[in-house]
Image (cartoon, rainbow, N blue to C red):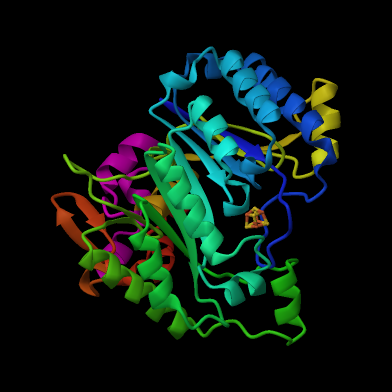
Amino acid sequence: MAGLYLHVPFCRQACHYCDFHFSTQTKHMADLVDAMVRESHLRLSSDPRWKDQTFTTLYLGGGTPSILPPDLLEALVSGVLTAVGQDASDFREVTLEANPEDMTKAQIQTWLGLGVTRLSLGVQSFHDETLAWMNRAHTGVQAERAIRLAHDLGVKAMTLDLIYGVPTSRDWNDDIARATALPTQHLSAYALTVEPGTVLGTRVERGAEQPAPDARTAEEYHRLCDAMAAQGWSHYETSNWAAPKPSQGHHASQHNSAYWSGAPYLALGPGAHGFLDSTRYANVSNNPRYIQAIRQGTLLDQREALTARDRYNELVMTGLRTAVGISPEELRRATGVRPKDVDGEAWTRALNRGRLVEHQPGWFRIPERDWITGDQVASSLFAVD
Ligand code: SF4
């Protein structure tokens, strides 16, 4: 079982905090789509192991896939699915990232017609001042209307993204209340990070902007944890909450859950990262260079062969961000790392300090209150030379 990820590297405008790979130059969309379809064929022919995989989740991310006109989106999805020999109905989950300003009735109907089962909505905040500070291209009311429209048109699963720790924001309680009042089943919330090279990063570097203090960011995170718990949502990963399902379980993201558990994923498009059998690749993050290379039949990527220890450490890092946590024995079995490579004293220290708990025999996790700083605990448990 594997994931399939398509990175659509175009946005209407640049959000001031964003360091993902995207371009606001949209005139080469058709060439890019053509190149991504070609890349799917190239990937499968260059590594036959991909042909043995069954892809169970499809995720269109970016950038902003919802910016693609219907004919190009159709060409992208059908071209890639033909290459992997599957239909949209073969997937358990087909997610498309969308921004509220793109969500017209016609666009949503196109997405449903292509087999999209889940929309991931870049909302970030419902407050127009905060949205303007972020340089988002929509208003809060527009986001609420778009989500209700998608629901009325039959979109059965929606997740929305929010950002906390915004220095100018004073409305976090209201953001949480408005998000959970909407017909959505999933929420992702991320702390605002100041990335070098972004507009925000440059402003902070010049002293024109101050990031929110860490204590305030942590307080907003904990307020969100409490609010979601009070409404019965499952906090299943550091940044992700899922509403309960009427029958059993909850609406967790299947694509991301597979990624966190170390499943292979075929990723296409400039800036996309893929993974198979301990090898990771990262496509060049430059649209013209990507298109040119693919036209010449070349995969322009960087590859990294991960050692057993690399894999172990990655799985510790991603596993300890989840409520399921990690089983050291399972990790050793999956990666080949030996017990002597692991610092037993670090485990004991983390357990004694309550930074790690054994929540069922052999399975360890970080207590929810500490998830926001969980990466420090995880890195202290890494396998060493
Ligand atoms: S829409 Fe998304 S990918 Fe594009 S600039 Fe904004 S945050 Fe980044």
State whether residue 122 is above or below residue 336: below
Q: Splitting the image into 4 quarters, where does residue 48 fall? A: top right
Q: Position of residue 173 (x, y in %)?
A: 38, 76
Q: Residue at x 21, y 63 (%)?
A: 357
The residue stretch that appears in magenta: 320-349
Relative side of 44 to 229, left or right:
right
> Can residue 304 be seen?
no
Nearest to the observer: residue 353 or residue 257? 257
Q: Quadrant of the N terminus?
A: top left
Residue 224 rendering spot, x and y as whole percentages: 35, 71
| Residue sitting at x 41%, y 51% | 318
Q: Is residue 260 left or right of residue 113?
A: left
Q: Quadrant of residue 71?
A: top right
Q: Is 137 drawn above or below residue 42 in the view shown? A: below
Taking 151 as reference, is 139 above or below it? Answer: below
Q: Residue placed at 23% from the left, 72% from the top?
A: 354
Q: Position of residue 80 (x, y in %)?
A: 61, 21
Q: Is residue 58 highlighted in magenta?
A: no
Asked if the magenta segment contains residue 335, the reply would be yes
Pinpoint residue 254: horizontal percent, then vertical percent.
38, 38
Residue at 52% across / 58% down in the picture? 143
Can residue 314 be seen here? The reply is yes
Looking at the image, the residue that sits furthest to the left is 361
Residue nearer the viewer, 344 or 298 = 298
Residue 23 vertical position relative to residue 298 in the rendered view, above or below: below
Q: Is residue 64 left or right of residue 120?
A: right
Ligand 1 image-quadrant field: bottom right
Q: How many marks?
A: 0
Q: In the depicted view, which residue is nearer to us: 195 or 337? A: 195
